[in-house]
Image: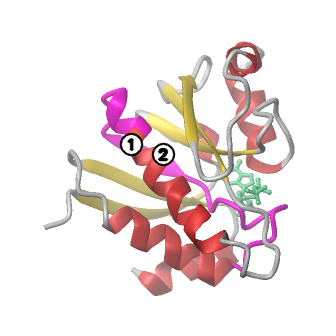
Amino acid sequence: MSAVRIAVVGGDITGEDVDAIVNAANSSLLGGGGVDGAIHRAAGPQLLEACRLLGGCATGEAKVTAGFDLRARWVIHTVGPVWRGGDHGEADLLASCYRASLLRAAEVDAHSVAFPAISTGAYGYPLHAAAEIAVCSVRQWAGEAMAVRFVCFDDTTRHAYDELL
Ligand code: ADP
């Protein structure tokens, strides 16, 4: 039996009232556009200071900082793959982002986690394929009980998740 409860919601992940929100970061972890920029703006400048100490992050992996001014206590920074046609390990790397993020969440005793649609913005991953990987990877979580929220910034993203759930 899955230890995961899944919800799909629309909106801005920075306002999520969960233990941890996941950031779709780039490998420098020093901020960027899209959801990364929004999270840094909402968390305040201390987030960048904390990220500087992490020394970057490889694609498919995840690292944790505090959430600072966010409602969420933690930010889990993960680096999705850039879409390069699909035969460069993108699917495995994207699945790894979701698994690694849930592992980091469990390590800090977070039991509710909000995810954005990792890699589907600037990184160009086809939305439907990415949503399928997100849902499958999270459903496979076999650790402690976890409430997962997929936060969809636009209607197209929301439809993709709604179709799967
Ligand atoms: P990536 O570089 O991993 O593709 P992006 O930030 O460009 O990351 O986009 C990932 C997803 O996050 C896209 O669906 C984008 O619309 C969405 N997004 C952007 N801003 C926010 C936000 N504030 N809250 C939730 N999702 C967001």
Extreme residue toward the bottom, this view: 163
Ligand 1 - quadrant of the structure image: bottom right
Left or right for 14, reference 140: right
Mark 2 and mark 1: Cα distance apart in space? 5 Å
Q: Quadrant of the C terminus?
A: bottom left
Judge whether residue 134 can be spotted in this image: yes
| Quarter where residue 4 is shown | bottom left
Q: Position of residue 125 (x, y in %)?
A: 74, 73
Q: Position of residue 8 (x, y in %)?
A: 46, 65
| Quarter where residue 110 is shown | top left
The residue sitting at 68% across, 37% down in the picture is 57
Residue identifier under label 2: 101
Left or right for 6, reference 3: right
Q: Which mark is residue 103?
A: 1
Q: Majority secondary structure of the magenta segment?
A: loop
For the residue pair 44 and 145, the one nearer the viewer reads as 145
Start-end of magenta stretch: 104-126
Extreme residue toward the front, this view: 88
The residue sitting at 71% across, 29% down in the picture is 42
Q: Position of residue 100 (x, y in %)?
A: 47, 47
Tell me: residue 123, above or below residue 13.
below
The residue sitting at 65% across, 49% down in the picture is 12
Q: Quadrant of the N terminus?
A: bottom left
Left or right for 23, reference 87: left
For the residue pair 140 and 147, the one nearer the viewer reads as 140
**Identity, as a three-letter code, of the amino acid under mark 2:** Ser
Q: Position of residue 21 (x, y in %)?
A: 53, 40
Mark 2 lies within 8 Å of ligand 1 (Cβ measured): no
Q: Are the residues tagged 2 and 1 within 8 Å (C-beta)?
A: yes
Q: Which mark is residue 150?
A: none
Q: Secondary structure at mark 2?
A: helix
Graded by Cα atoms within 10 Å as few (under 14), some (14 to 19) or many (20 or more), the crowding at tag 1 reads some
